[in-house]
Each structure stands twice: as C-alpha cells, then as structure tokens.
Amino acid sequence: MKDFEEYFSDAEIIKLLCKYRIGLAKRRNDHLFFRNLNKNSKRKVNQEGELTGIFPPRKEWRRPKLIDRKGKSSTSINFSALYGCILKAKKLHDRPLWLVKLLSLVGEIREQALHWDSNANFSKPKIKSIIKDSKKNFYRPLCVYSLENKIVITLTAKYLRDAFDSILSVNSYAFRARRTDGSFPNHHEAAAGLRNFIVESRESGNNVYIAECDIQKFFDAVSHRVAADAFTTLKKNLEAENLEELDRRAELVFFKYLDSYNFRENVKESERSILTQGGSFPWLDQPVLDELYSCGIDSELIGVPQGGALSPLISNLVLHACDSAVERDNHGVMYVRYCDDMIIAGTDYKRVYNAFERYKRVVSKLKLPIHEPQRISEYGKEFFETKSKSVYRLDKPLRKRYVQWVSFLGYQVRYDGLFRIRKTSLAKELKKQVEVTDSVIDCMVKNGTLTHRSANSFLHRLANKLVSMSVGKVSLNQECRSSQDMCWVNGFKNLRVYDCVGKQIKALDRNRNRQISRMLKKIKALEIHKKKQKQNGSSSGKKKLPNYYGYPFSYWKAIRSMEG
C-alpha cells in the first residue's frame, strides 16, 4: 500500500480536480440543453468559482484518437482530454497562467493535508437541500465542503479505505478498495451472490429462508462516539495483525471531519434559514431518540455528512461489528451487506433466525434505530411496503405466507433465481421520462408559440436526451454500446430477457415512444409548423419527420446486448 504522502502527489490531486471539472462540464451541458432550447430558461447551474481560472479553455482539451475513445464513456473521454492538455502544458517553458494557478492550488492542498495543524478545523459545510418526498415536502441535507477541504477529505478517505479493506468483511460490497484487476465490488455482484445462493440451495433440494433489516436514516442517526470507537477498534486490529500502521495525519483528518458536522446543529437548528420556501429535513422521532439515548441527547453528537467522502467509510467501519456477529456462525447462512442494506439467507430456519437476532443485538448496541421487523402472514402488497421482515420462506406460492420474490438493491430475485426490476425502480424511470419531456415542452412553448428553434429540433433533442439517459450513447453503425456510460440500463447488468423482464423493458420502451408522440401532439395543437412556415416564407406544408429511434436505441436491445 502507498504511503499517505503518495495519495497527495501532484498527479493525484490534479486528477481529482479534473474529475470535478468534468462533473461541472456535465452540469453545464445539462443546463445548456435547456438554454439552447429557450434563451429565457430559468434553469441555473452553479458555476463553481473555485474551479475558475485553473483549467485550460475547453477548445484546448486534447481529444483522444478514435481508437482510444472506442468503448469508453463520454466522462472518461473528457477526462483524458483535459488531463492530456495539462500534461502537455507542464512541458512548456512558458507555462500558461491557468497552469500556474492550478499548481499553486495543488501545493496549498498538499500543504494542508501533510502539515495539518492540530488546532485547525474543517470549515462547516454548506447544506444543500435535495427533494426527497415532494408530496410530504421532505428534503435530504447534502453537505458541500470548500474545494480544498473536499479534496483533503476525498484523498484521505481513499487512503483509509485502502488501509482498512483487508480486515473488512468480504460480504460487504459498498465503497470498497479497488481490486488487483482494477475492478470494485458492486451492487451487481451482491445481487448475483444472493441469486446464486438461492439457485444452488434449491437445486440441492433445500428450502430457502430470508430475513431483512432496514436501518432508519443511517447517516443522520449514527453517533459520533460510536463512529470514533469503531475507527479506534479497527485501527488496533489492523496494527495488531501487523497489516498496516495508520498515518497519524489521516487519523486527524477523520476526527476533524466528524467534528465539522452534526445533524442537530448543522441541519435542524438551521432548517428555516435553509428551506426558505418551506418543507423540512425529517429526523428520528423523539420517542426513538429517547429509547436510544436514555440519558438524553444534549451531550450527543449525531449524524455524519451526506455527500462527504468519509461517510461511506464510516458506514463500513460502524457496521463491521454487525458483519462479524453474523459471520461468527455462518454455516449454511449467506449474508450480504451493501452500505446499510443487508439480507440474510439460509437453508435452515433456526440458523437464519439466530443470525438475524445477532445482527439486531449489535445494531442496538451501536445505537442505530431500525424499522421493527414484521412477521409475514400473507404474501401481498403489504410485504413490499414492509421495510424490515422477520424470517420468511422463499418458495412457490403453495401457501399464503410463502414469498415468491425478494427485493434487494433495485432488483427482485424469484425463488428459482430469476431476476427482474424492482417495481419502485421501474416506476422511477417511467416518471423520469415524463419529467424530462415536460421540461422540454415547457422550454418549447412561450406564450403559446414556438421559441427560437424549429419543431423538429425539439423532437430531435428530446429523443436524444431520452435515449442517452436510458441506454447511453448509441449509433446505428455502432457494434456495441459502452458499458461505462452513466445510464439506467448499466444499473441493471444482471437482467436477462425472461418473460416478466421483457414486459418491464417493453413498458419502458413504450413509455419513451409515448413521450415523443406526446411532443408531436403538443406541436400540432399549437400549430407551430404553420407559424414557422410563415416566418420562413415557405409555402410547403410538408412536415419533417423525426429521426428513427427504434430497436437499436431501445432498452430491449441494450438488455439483450448484455446477455453476451
């Protein structure tokens, strides 16, 4: 493993800054998508002044050759283009002003991380509200640190993640260190592991029993004292096994990160000033807090920053005690955890029950609130609305209490190992298609007439937007789509086109086509074509049809291509 200093080399800091710049470029592109449709669009993008002046103009980015771009996502291509431009500029005798500013910032960040003043603290993060439940007007607090603090936190998190990874459970799949082959454990592997256990157990003639437990608002509920104790305990374990001795500076950053935030002070007490338009940040109910902290919470610091790079590591450190408790006697039991989502499966009811009880006891000691597990008396709608479930049998619907599908990480797995999309995940994607179309229609119409662009331009842009967010960038002459694109399909790589999955996928394709048809009807209702023809002096009433967006651009084709 690398030394702490190596994580803060010029190259590492510049690469991280490049990633932030690429993220800003994507947000600007999303803003320009609507801005180009309507110059009067009220959508705004955070320009992030901290990144201004330290990067070359976009036109100077060194775009990779076609052969180097093949199979890569647009984010990866843009990163290579920007980083390549910086490396070229560093070789110049007369360095441009932006590079001088960039290297100066890099030096300041490295100095802050490697020569940390024990009396210094992270600045309090800015709280950004993200809508969580529009019907109840609930928001989620997202913490945004200054650029320098953000980089110190992120690279320290990377160091600590690599350091602790060897003693964490192999059954924990979220936010782990990179493997030797360059890959990371992910939710696809976690869901596939559950599916394989179910199939192998049933093929051996065994019954399968499942238990699920959901922790309430983990990041807003975890105690600083518990997080600190977990860090200290695992640090001692790491050093006792002579695997690694943690750098004192990384430990200092970890505890300063905890000190920079707690939910009650940073969020609840400032709720009215943050949510000026109303709404609330939901927290734990008072009876729950009273039960967890019988001596009162006045002296307790609770909650870690959502959006901070060290918070996912904290979840793994804190819940490692739960992992160890379940795995202590795991004969015939399969345990999977992804952050605070967990599931226990086994072929023996008693063993699953005992493992589940051990998990709950440790969670209680960690002062984490859970949704009380419910016994399953009948498989139906209420089953999927229940967040925590006592041990139940996964089997054919021979009895009312037998469960056919288990939900985990966006997937649902049937008793015979078949995957399908979780209904809530499907509903979110359908809703997103409608919302994007509504946004384009809002930009298209101004005072009942078309804005400065043609009707076909709106159709083309809408279709491209819907395609890219669903299956990524695809062209008719493209042999295969990129598996790296940030799109909906790449979030469900375990899917195969069975009958029930095929119905779900076709529903997505139908709804996407329905949105384009809805746009056409809106155009026709406003008689946009006639007005445009008059403005252009055209006498032809022929309407240009939208480009073809059928099978090659469909969800169905993308899922089929992942079957190999």
Image: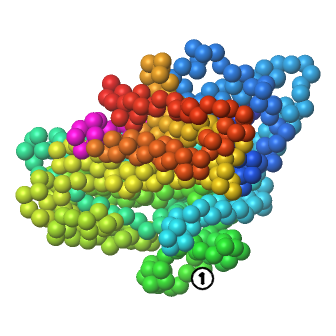
Extent of the magenta region: 490-502
Quarter of the view holding residue 564: top left
Q: List the residue tagged with mark 1.
A: 298
Query: Where is residue 477 drawn, in percent x and y?
Result: 48, 18
Is 427 covered by the magenta stretch?
Answer: no
From what the image shows, is residue 246 above or below residue 367? Answer: above
Q: Residue at x 71, y 62 (%)?
A: 126
Is residue 467 at all visible to an observer of this figure? yes
Q: Residue at x 33, y 38 (%)?
A: 494
Is 495 covered by the magenta stretch?
Answer: yes
From what the image shows, is residue 211 above or below residue 289? Answer: above
Query: Where is residue 520 drawn, in percent x and y?
Result: 51, 44
Query: Where is residue 197 drawn, in percent x and y?
Result: 22, 43
- Label 1, secondary structure: give it: loop
Residue type at numbered disc 1 = Asp
From what the image shows, is residue 69 above or below residue 340? Answer: above
Query: Where is residue 94 drawn, in percent x and y?
Result: 92, 22
Q: Classify residue 332 as left or right of residue 218.
A: left
Q: Residue at x 31, y 45 (%)?
A: 504
Q: Residues within 10 Å of mark 1 (few under 14, many from 20)?
A: few
